[in-house]
Amino acid sequence: MQLAAALDKQRKYDDAMDAYKSALKLMPGDMKATVGLHMASGQKALAARKFSEAAKEFEEVLRVSPNHAEAAKALKQARQGRP
């Protein structure tokens, strides 16, 4: 999962999502992997200006981790229509 986080920081969202999916196959239901997968997917959508899709991903992060500050900030950006 460290690889996934490193790829996420490098903004290699597709690779990060693949790594998080692999982690979830090994550890189904792992919260860090679940949050990471939705954050990477949301960031990818946000960068592509797919704001509605991004908002859904960030909302899912907040559903499983209600105090996730980064997801709350990103959700606000998505709702305001800015990457």
Image (spheres, grey):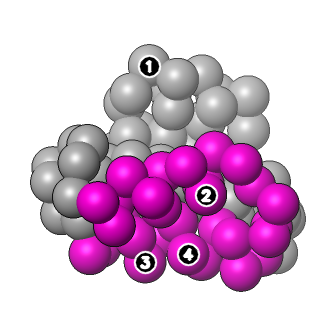
Other-residue count near label 1 (Cα within 10 Å), few / some / many at <14 / 14–19 / ≥20: few
Q: Is residue 39 magenta?
A: no
Furthest residue toward left: 49
At label 1, the amino acid type is: Gln
Q: Which residue is mark 4?
A: 59
Quarter of the picture holding the C terminus? top left
**x then y, percent, for residue 1:** 73, 38
Task: Name which of mark 4 and mark 1 comes first in the sequence.
Answer: 1
Is 6 above or below relative to 69? above
N-terminal label among 1 and 3: 1
Q: Secondary structure at mark 1?
A: loop
For label 2, the residue is 72
Distance, label 2 to label 4, CA atoms, is 8 Å
* Mark before the other along the chain sequence, 2 or 4: 4
Picture residue at 55% right of the left edge, 75% below the top: 59
Task: Say whether disc 1 or disc 2 marks the residue closer to the N-terminus.
Answer: 1
Amino acid under disc 4: Glu
Whether residue 18 is visible here, answered yes or no, is no
Neighbor class of circle 3 (other Cα within 10 Å; few <14, some 14-19, many 20+) is some
Q: Give yes or no for residue 56 being in the magenta stretch.
A: yes
Q: Is residue 10 above or below residue 12?
A: above
